[in-house]
């Protein structure tokens, strides 16, 4: 029953908070924190277990069975550590960050709901459950992005995130059904067998259909993991509270796409990803990582810099999955979750200290005011830019680079260039925000945040350094997760050299360009405006579609609904009313007459009707 | 002979009913109703339902008609007779009459007719010899002890409904008293 | 002796006469009498079926019991109904249905 506890605890917490503790923010927050801490402990207990507990039959139609079941393996238990671990730290951080928020109870309710949904995705034993929880994380993400819904920008961002995800989920659903058509099952464990049966029956069909199915499923990942061209919601989602950004939009939910792809790869077999589907996925990932890194270099909002960096890193992971190196992708997901959560929480602390100022050009000199936060942020940055040997990010990025080198040299080049860009923009953000002198009274009056915020930061900083070593015991459980750097040893030195060069170049460029500057020396409107993709969406897709649809719907509304249906039925009932009003004259004989007519009709229909 | 009696009483009854509807004076209507019910009681007797026939006379002609007359006199409703009947209700009423008559003829024309079987009193006497020897003896003597038979059914099979109807009459009596009391306010 | 259908025909005619009276007459007391006619028509049907569907050589006395009950209830109904008419007359000074149109309100 232990795995079910993981699922039920956050759900109960969310339900109790919503139903009974709406007015008691303190108890609500405590309950949420307690539930997530317990689930963290349970996750540790479950490490290495493969027994998912009892499964319940949900739908049973003829031969078709759909159970509700949990799947435990090295992948899901490892992912649960990430989810509950970062979840617990973010919950604790939020206690301080959201202390003065008016809707604290709602915030923690939504966090618990999110923990429930995310746990569901990770532990889901079949595709339908995955989809249900997939939508549930979308919902909780929507609720949390729109936490400050009084702000128009937050409400819009929440809507945007939700709708953009709809586009992806549409493809995802088709993909799920295609997979079902191919394998005859939704259950992950049985997919391989089903696929082999299908391949034996229709050897000529299986390749194309499989690629289509995988690409459709990938659509879901594109939406949820914010890959091009559906990446637009993630930067806007930074309107939500910073802990939310750390938990949902950096560490866990956006990684769900990669996780799900890996789950599918495990279920269908890595061979399924070879060919068109894998290539497409890899190129989308590589392209996303490049574009996002380019955009990140010109952002001024500290959270947006991190958001684009998240996009770029997710692009890495997707690329790795597409190239067949899903282990590398998962490894990077694991390490990235910790240090990106660290960076977001660090930026949250900075924003909190600077009185909700997010523009890095209004910060500066924070290293003196908040030394511990600065130190942890520096560690996070180091992990993200993959400082060799000491940080976890280095190992996982090295894995991805090695995969890319072995499979596709062009993508390898892109990846190395992205590594350079990553170093550059993170150095820029760090130098501008933390070094130099204060540029605004907000940063001038900043002071170190309280222990409730510092503790999660320090723990995450430890994980940012050590998570790659922690992964090794995890991977020992499942041979599929084992480091296999030795396989491509021939390119090892070359890869190491190139990434080190990228690191040094990026650091140099960042320092030289931004040291002591008060405004951005580079001005690239193309990048600042994010390649005008949002504008294109707004002007093209949204405007055309929306206005066209609006005109159509307006026509339907005014003429068909209002004029014909509503007005017509009103006029109809009015005229009927006028007709029947005569009957309602209060005349007893009239009623008796109608009664007689009724009796005549009853007799007619009962005895004479056919 | 019974057939002749049947038609005599039936026509009496129908004419009485028609007079109730047609005559403008309520007193005349009430008296016509009695005529109609006398005809009806005759039909009941022709159907060997002596008890019901007697009841019909006693209750309707004796009690209800008197009640109607009493109320008509009490309210002193002379002025109404002057009114000419309105056209629309008359047409409506005639329309319904027509429709019902057609349906009645249709139903009766499509169902098989049935002649009365003569009562088999000896067989009934044998059947009831054990359970009710008194009735059985009368049956054996060639009489139809109608009241005895009705009483037997009423106090055995329909005992509870009979009591309930008694309560109903009591309730009606009390209700009438309450309704007729002049409001003191 | 007349056949079943003759009895049913006669009773149906009585019923129709009663109904037409209910529809056509405006004096509520006469309407009431016509209702009594309709009830009696039903009684005649019951008694006719009692005689024609007899069992064991005797008429079916269950039907006659029903007639008995109908007569009783009709008597009670007449008593209460006439009391209501008296109360109505006291309140409205009329017993004409076309002047009693409070139902439309």
Image (tube, coloured by chain):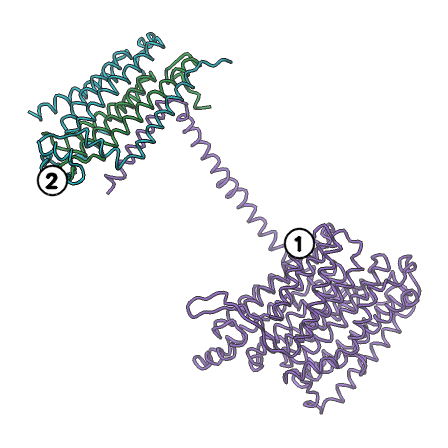
Chain colours: A purple, B cyan, C green
Kindly identify which residue carries mark 1.
A18
Q: Give how far across and how far down residue A520 sits, in percent.
A: 86, 65
Locate the N terminus of chain A and report the quarter of the image it occupies.
bottom right
Q: Give how far across and how far down residue A493 sits, in percent.
A: 76, 89
Task: Tell me the SS state at disc 1.
Answer: helix
Mark 2 neighbour density, 10 Å: few (under 14) some (14–19) many (20 or more): some
Q: Is residue B99 visible in this depiction of the protein? A: no
Locate the C terminus of chain A and report the quarter of the image it occupies.
top left
State the image quarter where residue A494 is shown. Answer: bottom right
- Residue A586, above or below B139: above
- How many marks the image carries: the answer is 2
Kindly identify which residue carries mark 2.
B126
User: Looking at the image, is mark 1 or mark 2 nearer the viewer?
Assistant: 2
State the image quarter where residue A364 is shown. Answer: bottom right
Q: Which residue occupies the extreme left position in the image?
A: B1
- Residue C47, above or below A488: above
Residue A384 relative to residue B130: left or right = right
Name the subunit of mark 1: A
State how far apart marks 1 and 2 are (Cα). 82 Å
Q: Give how far across and how far down residue A397 sits, in percent.
A: 73, 79
Identified at 29% across, 26% down, the residue is C72
Residue B72 relative to residue C16: left or right = right
Q: Nearer the viewer, residue A422 or A454?
A: A454
Q: Is residue C29 visible in this depiction of the protein? A: yes
Q: Nearer the viewer, residue A379 or B168?
A: B168
């Amino acid at each position: 029953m232990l795995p079910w506890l993981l699922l039920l605890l956050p759900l109960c917490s969310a339900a109790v908070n919503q139903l009974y503790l709406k007015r008691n923010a303190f108890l609500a927050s405590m309950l949420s924190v307690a539930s997530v801490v317990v689930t963290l402990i349970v996750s540790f207990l479950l490490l290495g277990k493969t027994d998912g507990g009892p499964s319940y039959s949900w739908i049973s139609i003829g031969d078709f069975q759909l159970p509700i079941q949990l799947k435990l393996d090295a992948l899901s238990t490892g992912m649960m550590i990430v989810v509950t671990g970062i979840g617990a730290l973010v919950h604790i951080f939020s206690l301080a960050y959201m202390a003065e928020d008016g809707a604290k109870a709602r915030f923690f309710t939504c966090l618990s709901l999110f923990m429930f949904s995310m746990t569901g995705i990770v532990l889901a034993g079949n595709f339908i459950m995955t989809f249900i929880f997939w939508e549930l994380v979308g919902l909780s993400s929507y609720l949390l992005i729109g936490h400050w819904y009084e702000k128009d920008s937050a409400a819009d961002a929440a809507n945007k995130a939700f709708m953009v995800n709809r586009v992806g989920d549409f493809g995802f659903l088709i993909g799920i059904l295609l997979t079902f058509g191919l394998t005859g099952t939704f259950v992950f464990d049985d997919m391989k067998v089903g696929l082999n049966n299908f391949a034996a029956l229709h050897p000529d069909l299986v390749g194309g259909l499989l690629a289509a199915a995988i690409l459709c499923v990938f659509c879901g990942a594109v939406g949820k993991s914010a890959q091009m061209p559906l990446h637009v919601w993630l930067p806007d989602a930074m309107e939500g509270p910073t802990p939310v950004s750390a938990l949902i939009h950096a560490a866990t939910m956006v990684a769900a796409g990669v996780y799900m792809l890996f789950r599918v790869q495990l279920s269908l077999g890595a061979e399924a990803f070879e060919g068109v589907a894998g290539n497409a996925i890899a190129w989308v990932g590589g392209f996303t990582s490049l574009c996002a890194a380019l955009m990140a270099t010109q952002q001024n909002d500290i959270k947006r810099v991190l958001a684009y960096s998240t996009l770029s890193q997710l692009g890495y992971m997707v690329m790795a999955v597409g190239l067949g190196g899903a282990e590398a992708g998962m490894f990077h997901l694991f390490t990235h979750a910790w240090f990106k959560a660290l960076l977001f929480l660090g930026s949250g602390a900075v924003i909190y200290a600077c009185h909700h100022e997010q523009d890095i050009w209004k910060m500066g000199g924070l290293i003196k005011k908040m030394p511990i936060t600065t130190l942890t942020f520096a560690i996070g940055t180091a992990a993200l830019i993959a400082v060799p040997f000491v940080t976890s990010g280095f190992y996982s990025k090295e894995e991805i680079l090695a995969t890319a080198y072995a499979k596709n040299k062009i993508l390898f080049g892109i990846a190395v260039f992205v590594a350079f860009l990553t170093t550059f923009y993170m150095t820029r953000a760090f130098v501008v925000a933390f070094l130099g002198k204060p540029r605004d009274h907000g940063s001038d009056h900043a002071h170190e945040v309280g222990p409730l915020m510092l503790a999660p930061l320090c723990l995450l900083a430890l994980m940012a350094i050590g998570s790659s070593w922690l992964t090794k015991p995890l991977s020992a459980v499942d041979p599929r997760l084992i480091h296999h750097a030795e396989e491509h040893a021939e390119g090892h030195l070359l890869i190491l050299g190139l990434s080190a060069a990228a690191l040094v170049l990026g650091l140099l460029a960042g320092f030289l360009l931004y040291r002591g500057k008060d405004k951005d020396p580079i001005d690239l409107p193309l990048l600042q405006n994010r390649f005008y993709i949002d504008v294109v969406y707004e002007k093209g897709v949204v405007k055309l579609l929306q206005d066209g649809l609006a005109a159509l719907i307006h026509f339907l509304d005014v003429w068909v609904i209002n004029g014909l249906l509503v007005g017509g039925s009103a006029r109809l009932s009015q005229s009927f009313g006028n007709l029947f009003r005569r009957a309602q004259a209060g005349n007893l004989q009239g009623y008796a007459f109608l009664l007689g007519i009724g009796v005549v009709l009853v007799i007619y229909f009962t005895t004479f009707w056919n | 002979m019974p057939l002749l009696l049947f038609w005599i009483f039936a026509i009496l009854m129908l004419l009485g009913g028609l007079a109730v509807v047609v005559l403008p004076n309520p007193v005349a209507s009430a008296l016509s109703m009695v005529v109609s019910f006398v005809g009806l009681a005759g039909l009941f007797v022709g159907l060997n339902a002596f008890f019901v026939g007697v009841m019909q006379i006693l209750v309707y002609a004796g009690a209800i008609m008197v009640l109607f007359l009493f109320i008509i006199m009490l309210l002193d409703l002379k002025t109404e007779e002057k009114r000419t009947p309105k056209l629309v209700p008359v047409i409506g009423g005639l329309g319904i009459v027509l429709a019902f008559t057609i349906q009645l003829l249709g139903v009766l024309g499509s169902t098989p007719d049935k002649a009365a079987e003569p009562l088999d009193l000896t067989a009934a006497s044998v059947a009831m010899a054990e359970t009710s020897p008194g009735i059985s003896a009368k049956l054996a003597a060639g009489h139809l002890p109608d009241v005895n038979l009705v009483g037997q059914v009423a106090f055995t099979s329909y005992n509870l409904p009979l009591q309930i109807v008694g309560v109903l009459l009591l309730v009606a009596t009390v209700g009438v008293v309450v309704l007729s009391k002049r409001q003191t306010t | 002796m007349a056949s079943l259908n003759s009895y049913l025909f006669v009773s149906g005619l009585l019923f129709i006469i009663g109904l037409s009276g209910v529809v056509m007459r405006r004096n509520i007391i006469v309407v009431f009498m016509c209702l009594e006619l309709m009830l009696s028509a039903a009684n005649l049907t019951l008694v006719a079926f009692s005689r024609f569907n007899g069992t064991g050589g005797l008429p079916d006395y269950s039907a006659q019991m029903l007639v008995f009950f109908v007569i009783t209830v009709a008597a009670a109904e007449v008593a209460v109904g006439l009391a209501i008419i008296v109360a109505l007359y006291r309140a409205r000074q009329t017993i004409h249905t076309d002047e009693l149109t409070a139902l439309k309100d």
